[in-house]
Amino acid sequence: MSASRVVERAHAVEGWTVTSTTTPIVRQERARAIERATGAPTTPEMLFDSALELVHEKSGVSLRFEAEDALRAWRAHGLPAIQVAAAQA
């Protein structure tokens, strides 16, 4: 993935730094690697390596949200696949 296509923005809010990283849709090779790493039978058609991170400056506590981690948790909990309605022509 081209670094120029990755956009990172950070904002400080009441002792927290909130950073968003946005990326283009991942390539098929990356999607397959995520499937192997997470054990997911498939990935969403439009999968991004984007992330949202919150860091508490005083304590150093951080929370990071990424699609790969969400897929891993979905598999670990044995949740059913989401059904998406097909578009009407």
Image (cartoon, rainbow, N blue to C red):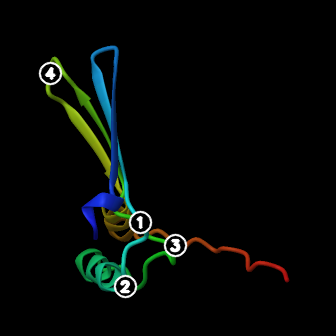
Three-letter code, disc 4? Ser
State how far apart marks 2 and 3 are (Cα): 23 Å
Residue depicted at 16% across the width and 17% down the height: 58
Q: Which residue is mark 3?
A: 80
State how far apart marks 4 and 2 are (Cα): 39 Å
Residue depicted at 83% across the width and 80% down the height: 88
State how far apart marks 1 and 3 are (Cα): 27 Å
Q: Which residue is mark 2?
A: 28
Q: Nearer the viewer, mark 4 or mark 2?
A: 2
Q: Where is residue 31 drawn, in percent x and y? A: 35, 79
Which comes sooner in the sequence, label 1 or label 4?
Answer: 1
39 lies above or below 47: below
Q: Where is residue 69 drawn, in percent x and y? A: 30, 60
Three-letter code, disc 1? Pro
Q: Secondary structure at mark 1?
A: loop
Q: Secondary structure at mark 4?
A: loop
Q: Which residue is mark 1?
A: 24
Which comes sooner in the sequence, label 2 or label 3?
Answer: 2
Which comes sooner in the sequence, label 4 or label 3?
Answer: 4
State how far apart marks 2 and 1 are (Cα): 12 Å
State how far apart marks 4 and 3 are (Cα): 37 Å
Q: Secondary structure at mark 2?
A: helix
53 lies above or below 4: above
Q: Which residue is mark 4?
A: 59
Q: Where is residue 53 drawn, in percent x and y? A: 30, 41
Q: Quadrant of residue 47?
A: bottom left
Residue depicted at 51% across the width and 78% down the height: 45
Three-letter code, disc 3? Pro
Q: Nearer the viewer, mark 2 or mark 3?
A: 2
Q: Secondary structure at mark 3?
A: loop
Which comes sooner in the sequence, label 1 or label 3?
Answer: 1
